[in-house]
Image (spheres, grey):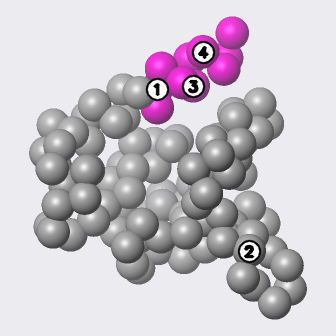
Amino acid sequence: MPEVRILEKIKHNIEVAKRCFGVGQLLGSPEPEYHICWVCGQPFNPDVAPYCEKCGTLICPQGHCLCSLPLEAQVAVSREIESLGMWDYSDPCGKRKKRRKH
């Protein structure tokens, strides 16, 4: 199943990020915060990353966002973001945007 491979890749990317940046940085230490791309696993600074106009998530330096995932994975990730209360609906046009962690 492609969904299983995608989830395994996401888990792998998180483990790589832990090794590269240390668990403390991923868990909210005062060091600069980095996000990890769901597609390529590349860490990036969310403060300088643009938002995707279509899906409302941050775009990594390689150009990936939630739109880059297969539809099944997009739905799963979107529901996870919703369950964590991380969608920001304050845009006057009604577009959702993923909240930054700060």
- Residue under label 2, please give it: 89
Specify start and end residues of the magenta stretch as a single range.
Answer: 1-10
* 18 on left or right of 79: left
Q: Secondary structure at mark 3?
A: helix
Q: Quadrant of residue 43?
A: bottom left
Residue 94 % position (x, y): 85, 79
The three-letter amino acid code for the residue at tag 2 is Tyr
User: Mark on residue 9?
Assistant: 1
Residue at 28% in and 31% down: 15
**Disc 4 to disc 3: CB gap under 8 Å:** yes
Q: Secondary structure at mark 4?
A: helix
- Residue under label 3, please give it: 6
Q: Earlier in the sequence, mark 2 or mark 4?
A: 4
The span from disc 2 to disc 1 (Cα, nearest Å) is: 29 Å
Q: Secondary structure at mark 2?
A: loop
Residue 64 % position (x, y): 57, 54
**Disc 3 to disc 1: CB gap under 8 Å:** yes
* 4 on left or right of 79: left
